Amino acid sequence: MADLFAKIATDPSMQAVRMGKETGIYPYFKPLSETEGTEVVIDGRRMIMIGSNNYLGLTTHPKVREAAIEATRKYGTSCTGSRFLNGTLELHKELERRLARFMGKQAAIVFSTGYQSNLGAITALLEKDDLAICDKEIHASLVDAVKMAGCQMKRFRHNDMNDLERVLKENKDAAKMVIVDGVYSMGGDLARVPEIAELCRKYGARFFVDDAHGLGVMGPGGRGTAIHFGCVDQVDLIMGTFSKSFASLGGVIAGDQDVIDFIQHHARSFIFSASMPPANAAAVLACLDIIEADPSYVERVHTQSAKVRKALREMGYNCGESVTPIIPVIIGSEMYTVAAWQSFFEYGIYTNPVLPPGVPPNKSLLRTSYMATHTDEQIEKIIAGFYEVGARIGLIQERETVAA
Amino acid sequence: MADLFAKIATDPSMQAVRMGKETGIYPYFKPLSETEGTEVVIDGRRMIMIGSNNYLGLTTHPKVREAAIEATRKYGTSCTGSRFLNGTLELHKELERRLARFMGKQAAIVFSTGYQSNLGAITALLEKDDLAICDKEIHASLVDAVKMAGCQMKRFRHNDMNDLERVLKENKDAAKMVIVDGVYSMGGDLARVPEIAELCRKYGARFFVDDAHGLGVMGPGGRGTAIHFGCVDQVDLIMGTFSKSFASLGGVIAGDQDVIDFIQHHARSFIFSASMPPANAAAVLACLDIIEADPSYVERVHTQSAKVRKALREMGYNCGESVTPIIPVIIGSEMYTVAAWQSFFEYGIYTNPVLPPGVPPNKSLLRTSYMATHTDEQIEKIIAGFYEVGARIGLIQERETVAA
């Protein structure tokens, strides 16, 4: 009789975890005891946070907090049921109407997490013989969704239009959807949305954009990557998440009314899961109010991150193709990346180390990301830290003067 | 070139939805504009709620609201990141320690939804050649989890120990796990946990109990179905959810430390999803405080539901094997069930209609469920309603006196 749990004792990644914990170099699950958004307290030490997806800094905005508090007072702390049954509030319907308008689509449906949004939409629409054509760097939740759908999957080289066209040409007859991220979560680069849309039209494919890191950040008013490129009508479905710019938890799929209706009645991650708590929904509505009234949040996340990107590149860091508030610092070796993470951590800068399988082998990186609410002083301190730590541990060459 | 969206126009379930909406008999997605827990307002009308999983009525408890509000003030409205990276607060760690103790296990891991808890645990532990042996009535999220895991699956007849033993005997050599619900969400009956545990021991299977509807309800202090049966040590993994008794959103898996560590490092729905917002975590902690200090909530949900169950059975309703606050009213035909739902709705009682595929064909039912906070007056009104409406539409025989 084989034991299902036998794999636990011999699993190589668990051995790596145990070794990391024993040597004190274990960069994951660091509990924060306080957070002001741009600063956090870990093990009693205050640090600058450049490892968050809180791009607009709205998680601590007074109006967002107040909206969440008011919703808790009005509705309580939970809906204790599926949207399908007793878990739909007027608040959810209002949120769906507002998001559809914001995202430039007829209709929208909100899910309790971003992960479940991708699961729900993809598994509702793609069946056994259908084909998902996926960029190699799409988010893990989309890969899980395609796996759960049980449909066919082909992948194309990241943002490579020739490779995408090859796959489309080879699968002319299939009922198919091209699936990409709007903003790639590790590289901070953008999908080539207009070219992909054109190829989808040419080969009869539907087009899905996961804009988790683009919604609230890209395009006029933060209305997303498709609107940034002026081709929202050529994208069939756009996914967004609330645990980034929208200071909450949850996700949304926007598209044509009939498609959204279909997803609403077929997405098992929607039907068989409890709905968004009132406070979570209210926080998103408050964020929409804020960014629709005041464009400075969206503008500022770009100006602040552009300063860092320029400085890092001048110092000689490899920031890949980043054009967004996500700026990777590509290091290469796993060990060196963990050591660099540790050095920045000790300096007082919180970054996220990303190792395989999150990135290809020998492409390990520190993922850094910036917020509209990072002050100029914090940005200067971050840049100074990248110079000081980077020169000390040999990530960059030391120079006469620092470009801060 | 086949169109992926062609299925939308011809889908039979969407045709049923359109017909239901046109005839005005469409029982789903009714938006609530207000909720006091036991009463809700829909379309401007106040109704008694017996279609909620808010078993202890804690979603509107002042201490639970206050804890959520305080957490929002202290931490903001979101963690904007994975538990793995920047999304772990001390609050999450505290919640995991408290839940492990409450559930009688060494360790626990919390997920952002109950759905993702099942997905994460099952996909982490079960691989291609492993075998999931599932009760036929387990929750949809477990079926989805097994599908995503890509492992083998066999099902046994609901709570049928001979059928379970047959499957175990036929798969003696496989690395396997038996998967059941503690409390079945539609029937309100209990898994035969001691007997299943004994069979698991005999045939070398691991044992997983989804106690979404049992945690906070069953056993001394609401500590769950396994503790109710006195055999928590014979269950390897216990899942709980926070969108029922715990007045929030999220879920938990409890078990031995090494198994939980393994899940923590392998569950993609944990790693690739944002963590529980501070308010959601704080609400669960407040619920634990309340039910650990005051056993009356757990006691009262049973006394109130027992009154209804006794009265319904005396009136001649078929309530199946219910022994919990979930009491099905089994009607049979789909049309008659929807008509009955409509009649109760118009009377001012909110129930949930459950049709195939939620139940087997010709086993359609109204799912009713009760709360510790239903007042005696509300319970009397519910019982009177079941008599009045049931007799009028022929669900039960009219009698001289009503047993209220």
Image (tube, coloured by chain):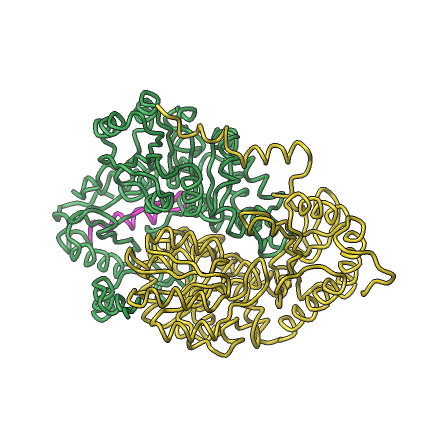
Chain colours: A green, B yellow
Question: Which image quarter is the C terminus of chain B in?
Answer: bottom right
Judge by depth and name the residue closer to the eye, A86 or A250: A86
Residue A90, by quadrant, is top right
**Is residue A216 shown left or right of residue A201?**
right
> Furthest-right residue in view?
B400
Give the image location of residue B314, x and y in percent.
75, 65
Give the image location of residue A213, x and y in percent.
37, 41
Q: Residue at x 77, y 50 (%)?
A: B394
Residue A196 in view, yes or no:
yes
Q: Is residue A229 above or below residue A274?
A: above
The stretch drawn in magenta includes residue A384: yes
Give the image location of residue A301, x and y in percent.
38, 40
**Is residue A207 shown left or right of residue A91?**
left
- Which residues fall within the magenta stretch? A368-388
Question: Which image quarter is the N terminus of chain B in?
Answer: top left
Judge by depth and name the residue closer to the eye, B297 or B180: B180
